[in-house]
Image: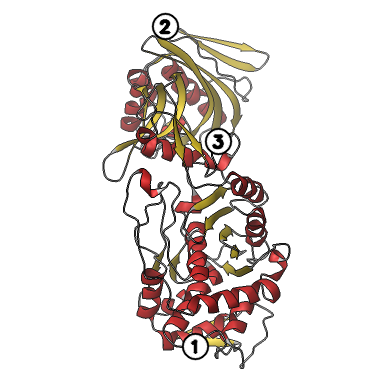
Amino acid sequence: MRKGVKVAVVGGVFTVMVGGAGYGAYNLVTAVAGGNTVSSHGSEHKSGPPSGDEVKDTAERFLAAWAKNDPAEAARLTDYAENAMSVLEDWHERAHVTRTELKATKADGTKVAFHVKATVSYGGKTRTMAYDSSLKVVRGKTTGRALVDWSPAVVHPALKKGDTLVTGKAAAPPIEAVDRDGAVLSDATYPSLGPVLDQLRAKYGDFAGGSPGIETYVERTTANGDTTTAKTLLTLAKGKTGKLRTTLSATAQAAAEQAVRKYPESSVVAVKASTGEVLAVANQEKGEFNAAFQGGNAPGSVMKIVSAAALIDNGVTSANGPAPCPDSAVALSQTFHNLKGLRADENATLANSFARSCNTAFIKLSDDLGAAEFAAEAKDRFGLGKDWKTGIVSRDGSVEMPGNSDDAAALIGHGQVKMNPLNMASVTATAITGAFHQPVLVPRDLDDRQLATAQGLRPGTSGQLKQMMRLTATSGTAAQAMAGVPGDKGAKTGSADVDGQGNANSWFAGYRDDVTAAATVPRGGHGGDAAGPIVAAVLRAGS
């Protein structure tokens, strides 16, 4: 045990006290009782998972070195010393932590959870930052030593690879985001908006009329080499708050927040169809990743909205034209089937096959349509893949046609098609209005950014799509989910089997009057079972 470290065993609880350098004391309380400590620095080359004693010893040494401001020693106890050294040096040099108190709260196998209490001092201001973190002890591949499995998240859960913890003048002024009617939007009231508000502040804080304060924040380097504030962790001195107007609706947002709580990993977006203004965005998971805007997965049969539009726009068939629904269909040597229990109908129209979500009808028509025509419909008429500038980070969908059976699969939302709820809410808006309006979360006049444009649909196509979506919502696969939605309404269900995961991902897109919404629930099953109730709840709330 290193000099300056005091050890005591009281009632089977192991405590380490570290002093010196003005950085305070460190207490480690583990769930591993008593016994002799085995050093992880012995000459014996070991293999296999670290023992309980090794986990305890390594965690003690690492946390003690960190608390005592000895980044070199702490880094040496990790499996990525160079990166650990940089982050741990920044803890004092750039984050300006002057006192560190660490206390382990739980040991579970090779994982040790601990509580951090950090005193931050800058510009004559001092505040305390407290949070929970954890570390994992692994066996070094070449040394056989028990080492901390290094990740910047050990120091703070908000840190990712390449991030820096900084204390100083904030990179952007604080904002008060408000909805379309002036209601304040906070992540306390609307938890899903946490990452959205962080991004809005970083991008538009300077436009909102405020002035920056002094904060501890996560600095992140973007793909183009710029730095941005990913998350504010502590405010030492408040700046002047500016007001930022968004397109969101507090009413729709509240309904979306409530709806996603019921389904793990679910996401939903609502859009005003006639303008493209985003009314709500919510994710059941409250991490930094905004799956509703940034996700990308096979959307299943909700993509038949685009497929049906392509078939009509290219003169292959019409809503009341033929679209036979056999039990199976073959495209480039791959055989496609319908969902279990769907009855074949060789006399089906496109509207019938759409409402019942018949896969084989669309596969059979894929040769008549052509891969290039389908890809062009998605991009040139629905605006997918055209570099949307919503106001925050977003993914605008992709439809790739590799020249094999995936081309046919794309028409039923599989193959190389990747979408998220934002994309499908926009697709639905284009379908019912006939025009593409790029989705926006922040009004364009705030920064005069260039929005994506697309042709929209041929005359008459939108009316046929609405006819088919109405049929689906009243007597087709979406009828049960949409039963309580008033007004002019329509919908499309979807389910997507991804990488043999078991239960399919649930997708649903729908509209009520001038509001469209789309949702997905990973492993939620049929579209009407999980994603459907989410969309219906948001549509009932209106705008």
Question: Which comes before the other along the chain, label 3 or label 1?
Answer: 3
Residue at 38% over, 38% down? 204
Disc 3 residue crowd, few under 14, some 14–19, many 20+, Cα 10 Å: some
Residue 82 place in picture, x, y as percent: 30, 31
Q: Please, what secondary structure does the residue beneath circle 2 have? A: loop
Marks 1 and 2 close (CB-CB < 8 Å):
no
Report the residue marked by disc 2. 22
Q: Please, what secondary structure does the residue beneath circle 1 have? A: loop
Q: Is residue 18 above or below residue 265?
A: above
Residue at 37% over, 43% down? 446
Residue 291 place in picture, x, y as percent: 50, 51
In front of the other: 118 or 213? 213
Total marks placed: 3
Q: At label 3, which amino acid type do we have?
A: Val
In front of the other: 525 or 383? 383
Residue 187 place in picture, x, y as percent: 55, 36
Report the residue marked by disc 3. 184
In front of the other: 502 or 403? 403
Q: Please, what secondary structure does the residue beneath circle 3 have? A: loop
Disc 1 vs disc 2: which is toward the camera? 1
Question: Which comes before the other along the chain, label 1 or label 2?
Answer: 2
Residue at 48% over, 53% down? 277
Disc 2 vs disc 3: which is toward the camera? 3
Q: At label 2, which amino acid type do we have?
A: Gly
Q: At label 1, which amino acid type do we have?
A: Thr
Relative to 207, 107 lies left or right: right
Report the residue marked by disc 1. 317
Question: Which comes before the other along the chain, label 2 or label 3?
Answer: 2
